[in-house]
């Protein structure tokens, strides 16, 4: 691949993955500036790779390098903070009613708050699965967990969120009956 084609490839990968990698790095570091540094370093490392070595698994490679760089940074600073805000991207097919949008945002907010109550390993695999659309195998490669462990963590985490959502729904329903 000549340098012009490699440059085009790098630019297309950057356009596609910079946002998701930054959000992922923020989740790990808890700091936007550190996350940007980690993502920048990740892309610098990509530039030093031969595209043929990573092209078939570029997302997995990027997230693995990003995760490792972020964890290295945290080890260096001797701190771990997984409690930062996460931005969800949602592009509706058509414009729903404002009340529907507000209700959906409230539900997503509640789910994200409940997600924050899970252990960090469950949060990480659930975010990789649903915010970055990674397969269990890709998550396994990024996190160094077995595929079955990834599946177990996702299942357990989602089950806990469902249980907590149902409990909240029941308590709201009971409250609303009392208010009437």
Image: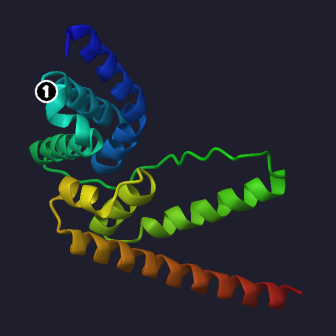
Which image quadrant is residue 157 in? bottom left
In the rendered view, tell whether residue 175 sits above or below residue 2. below
Residue 59: which quarter of the image? top left
Quarter of the image for the N terminus: give it. top left
Report the residue at 51% width, 62% height from top.
Answer: 112
Q: Is residue 76 left or right of residue 107?
A: left
Say whether residue 104 is left or right of residue 60. right
SS type, badge 1: loop
Tell me residue 99's x, y (percent): 82, 57
Residue found farthest to the front: 1
Q: Tally the numbered discs.
A: 1
Vertical order, 4 against 35 (above or below): above
Residue 108 position (above or below residue 67): below
**Residue under circle 1?**
49
Residue at point 19%, 51% (across, down): 79
Q: Which residue is located at x 20 percent, y 11 percent? A: 2
Q: Position of residue 62 (x, y in %)?
A: 25, 39
Residue 155 locus on image (x, y percent)? 38, 77
Q: Residue at x 20, y 46 (%)?
A: 64
Front-lying residue, 60 or 157: 60
In x, y percent, where is residue 142? 21, 53
């Amino acid at each position: 691949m000549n340098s012009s084609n490699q440059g085009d490839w790098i630019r297309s990968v950057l356009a596609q993955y910079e946002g998701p990698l930054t959000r992922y790095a923020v989740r790990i570091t808890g700091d936007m500036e550190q996350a940007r540094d980690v993502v920048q370093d990740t892309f610098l490392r990509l530039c030093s790779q031969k595209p043929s070595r990573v092209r078939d698994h570029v997302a997995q490679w990027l997230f693995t390098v990003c995760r490792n760089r972020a964890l290295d940074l945290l080890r260096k600073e001797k701190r771990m903070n997984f409690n930062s805000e996460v931005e969800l991207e949602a592009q509706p097919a058509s414009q729903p009613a404002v009340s529907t949008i507000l209700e959906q945002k409230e539900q997503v907010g509640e789910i994200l708050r409940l997600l924050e109550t899970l252990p960090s390993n469950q949060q990480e695999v659930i975010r990789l699965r649903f915010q970055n659309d990674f397969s269990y195998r890709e998550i396994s490669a990024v996190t160094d967990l077995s595929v079955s462990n990834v599946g177990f963590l996702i299942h357990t985490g989602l089950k806990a969120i469902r249980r907590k959502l149902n409990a909240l729904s029941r308590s709201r329903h009971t409250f609303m009956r009392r208010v009437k």
